[in-house]
Image: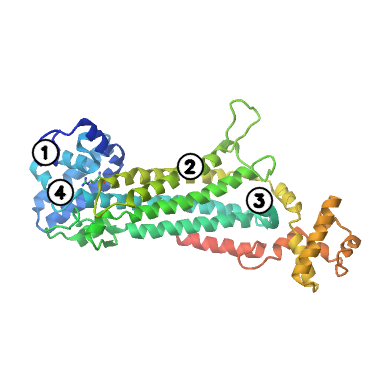
Amino acid sequence: MAKLWGGRFNKATDKKVDDFNSSIAFDARLYKQDITGSIAHATMLGSVGIITPEESQLIVQTLKEILADIEAGKVAFSIDAEDIHMNIETILIDRIGDVGKKLHTGRSRNDQVALDIRMYIKDEITEISKLLRHTMQTILTKAEQNTDTIMPGYTHLQKAQPITFAHYLLAYFQMFRRDYGRLQDTYKRCDVMPLGSGALAGTTFPLDRELVKNLLGFSSITENSLDGVSDRDFALELLSALSILSVHLSRMSEEMILFNTHEFSYIEMDDAFSTGSSIMPQKKNPDIAELVRGKSGRVFGDLMALLTVMKGLPLAYNKDMQEDKEAIFDAIDTIKMCLPIFTDMLSTLTIRKENMRKGAAGGFTNATDYADYLVKKGVPFREAHGISGRTVFYCISQNKALEDLSLEEFKTFSPLIEEDVYSAIALETCVNERKIYGGPAKEAVLTAIQNAKEFLDTI
Ligand code: ARG
């Protein structure tokens, strides 16, 4: 097949070069954005009189037919036409001849691909945002059901202080809320229309960039033609946002795996979201959570790949930038696969409330509250900390919890200790006295739930 750019060449391209150079195998998925962008460009060319209204109409009409044919599976793309942009242009020219050859007036594939990828990412951010909203909603529903479910909070994976499962879940709500915000910020940077940048130095044709911007639903146009074709910051931002989101999915998956073990038994994953072993009949494995955790590596890799591609590129366009697509697509596909299955896995979890409570009752999670009790009796905190530590040491030797000690035993550590110590160190007290804004007390968690609901109502 003759190349659209074949004029200054004497020889056909080596077959290996076609294979190596072409991107149609992975950029075919941009067909819709490419055609939509071309329809806007052709409409504008007609409107400013660069082509006639009839020519513009014929191009627009034929592009719509090509779109319908692609969606009906009637179009085969060719590696000879290199990428999605030239495949569609070639098909257009095949269908309407010379008029089709006018479409690319005042345009370059460099600004065309920048346009397509921005449009693609905008659409995908909208999709991912919906999935993420559903994840947040699911977390919130589970939190509402668990405001009284006491569990140990951890530091260093050692039992630390009692919290509730609702409070734990709402920590992830906050992470996903920030992820959501990062995606909306990224959207703003994608929402800038680059056509008119040409290959790098704009164009001599009087293109109406504002019209194209409006036709395509962009908020503004790029300010510098060199930057318009060489900027991939918006893609890096997307990959960063998706990487951070992956960190959150991975951390929560890790905890689901841990809490689902026989040793913890805080939760049980539904049979429909667990898998068996080919040899060990007793096994019920948390493969979904493990895969979500593992797939974070792909997304980080995608970010690293694009950062590395971009870091040494002289202005403006370089073919290296064709490598942006697989990274972008892979990260988007991965997140779109992970979010729904992760969310369904969460929504079908069984919460073993009694085991969580047992976990909170062991391990001296009320030792801080015991020290705080002494502080309220007038003991300076550092001293109270020491008394509490010595009491814990004693308890360990007696194989007892703090609340198992008799008042006489308590008094050997401080004469200030009275009967009221027992209610002060009860788990419910430890949790529900932490009423501070952002804390785990039921009162504070109900406020957090209300705030979370209000946020979800705004998105
Ligand atoms: N397939 C190319 C890409 O994805 C399109 C732009 C090609 N431009 C060029 N001057 N070769 O980046």
- Identify the residue shown where x is 12% and y is 39%: 6
Q: Earlier in the sequence, mark 3 or mark 1?
A: 1
Label 1 CA crowd tier, 10 Å (few <14, some 14–19, many 20+): few
- In the rendered structure, find residue 104 and report the number of the disc placed on it: 4
Identified by mark 4, the residue type is His
Of circles 4 and 2, the one toward us is 2
Identified by mark 3, the residue type is Leu
- Identify the residue shown where x is 24% and y is 40%: 83
Which residue is identified by label 1?
9
The image position of residue 217, as x and y in percent, is: 28, 58
The image position of residue 95, as x and y in percent, is: 13, 38
Residues marked 1 and 4 touching at CB (< 8 Å): no
Quarter holding the N terminus is top left
User: Which quarter is ligand 1 in?
Assistant: top left
| Image side of residue 135 versus residue 34, left or right | right
| Image side of residue 438 versus residue 365, left or right | left
Residue extending farthest to the right is 408
